[in-house]
Amino acid sequence: TASPPPARRKKPEAPALKVGEGSSSSQVLVKPGHREGLLQPNKQKQLATSRSLVHYLRGRAVSTWSSARLLGFEGKLHSSTVLRLPEILTERQLALGTLNKIFASQWLNSRQVVCGTKCNTLFVLDVQSGQINRIPLIRDRVPILSRDQPTTGIHAIELNPSKTLLATGGENPNSLAVYQLPTLDPLCLGDRHAHKDWIFSIAWLSDTVAVSGSRDGTMALWQVDPDRNASIALQNDGKFPVYTHIYPKHIEAIPKANSNIGNHRVRALAFSGMNQELGAASVDGYFHLWKAGNTLSRLLSFRLPYGQESMCLTYCNDFSLYVVGSYSHVTFLDLRRGHQNIQPLSLYECGTGVRSLSVYQHIVTVGTGHGSLLFYDIRAQKFLEERASASLDSFLGPTGRKLKLTCGRGWLNRDELWVNYFGGVEEFPNALYTHCYNWPEMKLFVAGGPLPSGLHGHYAGLWS
């Protein structure tokens, strides 16, 4: 008799595919050949359950959720919080005495912000109590020729990645001052053979390497050695503050597109750690990119389409974008796909340009020269909108109007200059020169002052 035919092996099923990976939609497992719309009812129920906050909390309490599932849901919750936070923020103004225009700020911890002003004051502000502690500025080895000259202020404050060092300007605004954290003891001063004009911007490339950008059109790369200064301090026995004077490892001048030297100022810096590249925006409307290492090696330079009076620059890790703020626009630069592939944001309605920028996940916060904050969603490519309900029984819905937070009046010195040159005008919008988020506690610190250079005043507010 003939032997029976060999049993056919069951063909293994193809692995499930993930739909929506990398997007804001939920990840659903779908077999090849099946469409997302043809899910079985029980799968639809599981999907709805996985997006429920109530089921999430219940599942977490009895440990029925896997760690990956928990992290995924918590990520969605955090993204939703980032999107909704701006519309629920309320302002509490902070009194700072007679300080003049806050140019820079950074959070030190959950309740302290360090700030720098136009009147060359570096101070720590306790946002809960309002207490101000001034930090002594570090002096050059060779004193400034005349201390009676008007000061130009502290334009930059940056913490290194591990938040153990703080870099800012010295008593001479041309010098780079580095302090140790959390004590804020002086560590070193870059005052030897470096910048001949004010430092406008600072970027940390690592915990011990920083770059400063100056109004003189140069960038200086600095190596900081905390251990060396610690040994000197021990020899001093703590009798008086000790710090070292350091030289730059490398000086790089930005290319000069024309003969107007005043336009070649380095206005802002931003570092991409993923690509090890440093971007710079100059006042003449150009963007420059350097490969950052032991030295700075220039990769490219090009003119921005809306680069007039470029004031600020930041880098968005989530989308690999440089974001430039200028007099009339916010420009997005994706250097992997050409210079620009997202439509620039026109801010002519503000009339006074972009004065501060920050990016967190997919939300860009824009501080204007007209005392307002705007919020742009990169993912949706539109501004966040105000939301309101049509009736008491309806849910909140978009109104079509941009969400705008308008800052308070602040303080203005009503002196002779104010009377003689500004006609005693009672109110001036405050330019928002700086803002910084404390995301774990959902707080936003915003500061600045009156835009006209001759006016003396300030604004500071905690939005939470």
Image: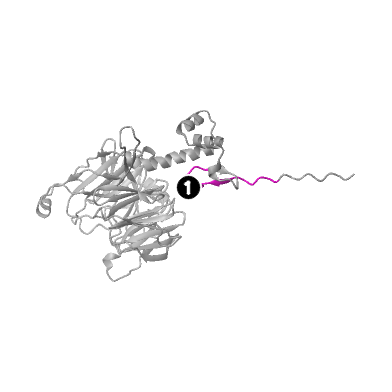
* Residue 270 in picture, x, y percent from top left: 38, 55
Q: Is residue 27 magenta?
A: yes
> Residue 261: x, y in percent?
28, 68
Q: Nearer the viewer, residue 398 or 455?
A: 398
User: Which residue lies under the disc numbered 1?
Assistant: 23
Q: Between 206 and 347, which is closer to the camera in this rendering?
A: 347
Taking the magenta stretch, the answer to whether it contains residue 450 is: no
Q: Furthest-right residue in view?
A: 1
Left-right relation of 152 to 38: left
* View extreme (bottom): residue: 259
Main SS, magenta residues: loop
**37 shown above or below 322:** above
Relative height, residue 61 to residue 387 (above, below): above
Point 12% across, 51% down: residue: 418
Instruction: Say which quadrant the C terminus sits in.
Output: top left
Magenta stretch: give its range: 11-28
Q: Nearer the viewer, residue 84 or 28?
A: 28
